[in-house]
Image (tube, grey):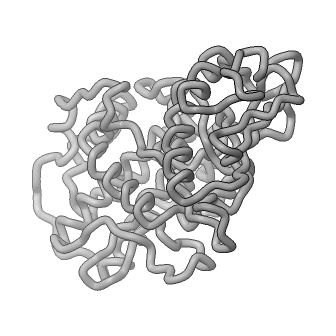
């Protein structure tokens, strides 16, 4: 799986927008999580928001991963972070989506012990640090928990990863470390999760959609252009054109023409996008798109700037992101597939 694009590639505003997305999706994803726990015979009533509840939670997760059954999870589900950064969809994408809400449950547990905890950025100060701008739970003591990535990284490694991942206390140890020790004596309390069985938010509700990722300008200049080569392409690797899904050439031609793109000073036709010799120009030689064709069908478009200013780039980036989404594709770095 290619995960070459990370949070450090983003503008600070874009990284912040993902923090907002985490907050907006919380109710929807906790509702999903409650139904998955119930449908798999999980410890719904034991999940009371306490640190101690992290043991039955992790034990249940291990059992579900081993069983391989996710009865309430859509077959084509993809996690927020994968959609946001354009990471490859693979055989574990549904599993990662299923356990993404662990981040919200962990947040509730941490806030129960530390009301001052909040979502924030990883402590990396420079882009060379791996957690730079990653969304984490930041405690009052300035420790952090990379909760958003727990559901993404851990479940696919349960079966063949280190033994420590299969210990019932694995998640509890992470939280204890951040909060500075073991919790106090536990008291009987109602389930935190069961009330969310009543929360049912449609799969196409906007609160579930991550924002558009916006990449940092090239430090060498170039009109706000991201430093990597950019493409309009379906999610997935681009090394085998035959395996890349086709795109709707007519919809793309109409959308590009409406944005102001032209071929030889004429509106773009669908056939132009099936011709690998085509050069599509935006404005007065501001930017260039070139089709990559296989089997007489468009597979993706390579993007490059020519004489783009910062203002040009702002318009292009927003417009191409929106156009790509309209044809089930993404506007992203080429190596992010």
Horizontal side of residue 36 vs 291, given as left or right: left
Q: Is residue 47 above or below residue 178?
A: above
- Residue at 20% from the left image edge and 37% from the top image edge: 196
Would residue 18 be visible to someone looking at this image?
yes
Would residue 6 be visible to someone looking at this image?
no
Q: Nearer the viewer, residue 102 or 128?
A: 128
Horizontal side of residue 283 vs 176, given as left or right: right
Q: Nearer the viewer, residue 192 or 135?
A: 135
- Number of marks present in the image shown: 0
The quarter holding residue 206 reads top left
- Residue at 66% from the left image edge and 21% from the top image edge: 267
Q: Give the percent coordinates (x, y) of residue 63.
A: 49, 42
Q: Give the percent coordinates (x, y) of residue 231.
A: 70, 42
Q: Nearer the viewer, residue 273 or 43?
A: 273
Quarter holding the C terminus is top right
Q: Is residue 212 above or below residue 118?
A: above
- Residue at 31% from the left image edge and 43% from the top image edge: 25
Horizontal side of residue 299 vs 5, given as left or right: right
Q: Give the percent coordinates (x, y) of residue 130.
A: 59, 73
Q: Is residue 299 above or below residue 17?
A: above
Q: Nearer the viewer, residue 259 or 104?
A: 259
- Residue at 65% from the left image edge and 21% from the top image edge: 253
Q: Give the percent coordinates (x, y) of residue 37.
A: 34, 36
């Amino acid at each position: 799986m290619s995960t070459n694009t990370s949070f450090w590639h983003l503008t600070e505003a874009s990284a912040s927008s993902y923090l907002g997305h985490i907050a907006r999706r919380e109710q929807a994803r906790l509702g999903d999580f409650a139904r998955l726990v119930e449908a798999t015979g999980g410890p719904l009533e034991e999940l009371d928001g306490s640190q101690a509840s992290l043991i039955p939670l992790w034990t249940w997760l291990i059992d579900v991963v081993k069983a391989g059954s996710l009865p309430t999870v859509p077959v084509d589900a993809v996690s927020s972070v994968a959609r946001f950064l354009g990471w490859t969809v693979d055989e574990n994408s549904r599993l990662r989506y299923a356990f993404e809400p662990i981040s919200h449950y962990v947040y509730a547990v941490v806030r129960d012990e530390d009301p001052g905890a909040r979502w924030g950025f990883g402590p990396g100060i420079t882009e060379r640090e791996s957690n730079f701008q990653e969304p984490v739970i930041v405690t009052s003591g300035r420790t952090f928990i990379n909760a958003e990535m727990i559901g993404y990284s851990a479940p696919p490694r349960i079966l063949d990863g280190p033994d420590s991942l299969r210990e019932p206390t694995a998640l509890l140890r992470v939280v204890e470390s951040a909060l500075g020790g073991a919790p106090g004596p536990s008291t009987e309390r109602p389930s935190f999760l069961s009330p969310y069985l009543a929360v049912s938010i449609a799969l196409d509700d906007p609160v579930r959609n991550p924002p558009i990722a916006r990449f940092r300008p090239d430090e060498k200049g170039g009109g706000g252009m991201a430093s990597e080569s950019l493409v309009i392409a379906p999610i997935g690797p681009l090394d085998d054109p035959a395996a890349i899904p086709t795109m709707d050439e007519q919809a793309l031609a109409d959308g590009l023409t409406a944005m102001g793109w032209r071929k030889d000073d004429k509106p773009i036709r669908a056939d132009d996008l099936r011709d690998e010799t085509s050069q599509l120009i935006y404005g007065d030689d501001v930017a260039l798109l070139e089709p990559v064709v296989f089997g007489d069908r468009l597979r993706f478009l390579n993007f490059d700037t020519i004489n783009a200013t910062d203002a040009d780039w702002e318009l292009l980036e927003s417009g191409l992101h929106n156009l790509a989404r309209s044809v089930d594709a993404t506007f992203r770095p080429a190596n992010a597939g």
